[in-house]
Amino acid sequence: MAVLNILRYPDPRLHRVAEPVREVDDRIRQLVRDMAETMYAAPGIGLAATQVDVHLRVIVIDVSEARDQLRVFVNPEIVERSDDTKVYEEGCLSVPGIYDEVERPDRVTVRALDENGEPFTLQADALLAVCVQHEIDHLNGRVFVQYLSRLKQSRIKSRLLKAERAVA
Ligand code: QAP
Ligand code: CO
């Protein structure tokens, strides 16, 4: 097990499009374990492989209060979206300290493979629906700040670059 390094916006690697997993093998299961450990250590409620610089379509999510309901999605696909939308204040482990409102479909149906390569379908609402959409965006190279105005994006970029310089 290992806590992996999380890429920070505006790292260009966050905009790579992840490749589908060809086979859910031990290498993928090891990645899932490391991603889960990384997410719990942060702590966060969701993490996409893109954020740890692995460009494969793998996501881990745990929105439970007790932090004991890990959900694993390999090759996730949204197969249905509700017409009604909801605004939620999102954050991201790759955009530390920044939170802002994003509007998305209120409910989604997701099809994916689990850590054993078994297909499943999940109807997600509330926070889980927000999180699944946010994480699938990462696999497509999209970070939530890209839904915000250009002005906000550029302010967030300078703030995070400045924070990086302060650490270095
Ligand atoms: C994505 O985000 C998400 O800024 C997961 O300093 C967020 O786990 C989906 C975090 C909101 C739905 C709603 C962020 C931790 C964690 C920070 C996270 C920070 C420390 C974010
Ligand atoms: Co994120």
Image (tube, rainbow, N blue to C red):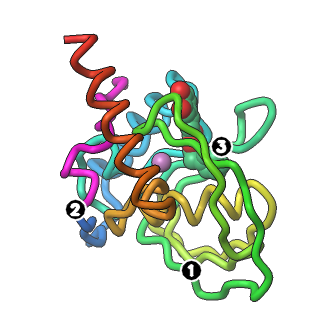
Left or right: 139 as drawn, with respect to 79: left
Q: Position of residue 111 (x, y in %)?
A: 57, 78
| Within-10-Å neighbours for mark 1: few <14, some 14–19, many 20+ | some
**Residue that numbered label 3 is attached to:** 62
- For marks 2 and 3 on the same chain, the one whose residue lies earlier in the sequence: 2
Q: Position of residue 98 (x, y in %)?
A: 53, 36
Splitting the image into 4 quarters, where does residue 83 fall? Answer: bottom right
Based on the picture, tell me whether residue 10 belongs to the magenta stretch: yes
- The amino acid at mark 1 is Ile
In front of the other: 14 or 73: 14
**Residue that numbered label 1 is attached to:** 78
Tags 2 and 1 in contact by the CB under 8 Å rule?
A: no
Q: Position of residue 113 (x, y in %)?
A: 49, 69
Q: Position of residue 4 (x, y in %)?
A: 32, 29
**Residue that numbered label 2 is attached to:** 16
- For marks 2 and 1 on the same chain, the one whose residue lies earlier in the sequence: 2
- For marks 1 and 3 on the same chain, the one whose residue lies earlier in the sequence: 3
- The amino acid at mark 3 is Asp
| Within-10-Å neighbours for mark 3: few <14, some 14–19, many 20+ | many
- The amino acid at mark 2 is Arg
Task: Determine the quadrant in which ligand 1 lies.
Answer: top right
Disc number lying in front (2 or 3): 2
Which residue is at the far top?
A: 167
Name the residue: 28% across, 52% down: 14
In front of the other: 25 or 21: 21
Is the CB–ligand 1 distance for label 1 below 8 Å? no
Name the residue: 45% across, 65% down: 137
Marks 2 and 3, Cα distance to the nearest angstrom? 24 Å
Based on the picture, tell me whether residue 141 belongs to the magenta stretch: no
